Image (cartoon, helix red, strand yellow):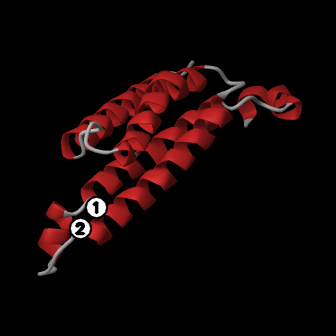
Amino acid sequence: MPRSVKVCILVHIVLTLIGLAAHIDQHPPGQSLFFWWPVLLGVISLLIVTVLYIFPATVAWGFLFTTMAVGLGTIGMAYFTMLTFEEPYSFWRVATDSTLPKILLLWLKLPTAWVIFSKMKPLRKEEAARGCLT
């Protein structure tokens, strides 16, 4: 496994832990059943997707789940902001008081997942035959 993949898997773990901690801090899961689905996605991302990234045969499933989780998280956070955000609107308030920073943090998982996927995906026979000339 290339060193860059190991670093990206570590970045994936750190981003997942930061996102999970931020979510639990803002929305304690004990308050509502609605607050449990991001916790579940975060735990799956931490425990299962990390393992999927280790093996070339399953790296595509890890990338697919990460993309799905980022999409669902973005929709959920944007919806929460639309329901709870109050006037006055300003750039500074949107940047600090909305879920925009957390959405951007979540989006950082996409390029990380893409690097892992592109470095670890199994090669087709004709690509493997070319070796280091690709």
Which of the two marks, 1 or 2, is nearer to us in this view?
A: 2
Residue 26 position, x and y percent, is 20, 46
Neighbour class for label 2 at 10 Å: few (<14), some, many (≥20)? few
- With 104 as the anchor, is 114 left or right in this view? right
Q: Secondary structure at mark 1?
A: helix
* Residue topped by disc 2: 84
Which quarter of the rendered picture does the C terminus lie within? top right
1 and 2 marks in contact (CB < 8 Å): no
Q: Amino acid at mark 1?
A: Leu
Relative to 12, is 98 above or below? Answer: below
Residue at x 47%, y 49% (from the top left corner): 70
Q: Which callout, 1 or 2, points at the residue further toward the start of the chain?
A: 2
Residue 40 position, x and y percent, is 44, 34
Relative to 6, is 106 above or below? Answer: below
In the image, 110 versus 80, the foreground residue is 80
Residue 132 position, x and y percent, is 71, 28
Question: What is the C-alpha distance between the residues marked 1 and 2?
Answer: 13 Å
Q: Which quarter of the picture shows residue 27? A: top left
Residue at x 13%, y 70% (from the top left corner): 93
- With 36 as the anchor, is 131 left or right in this view? right
Q: Amino acid at mark 2?
A: Thr
In the image, 55 versus 78, the foreground residue is 78
* Residue topped by disc 1: 100
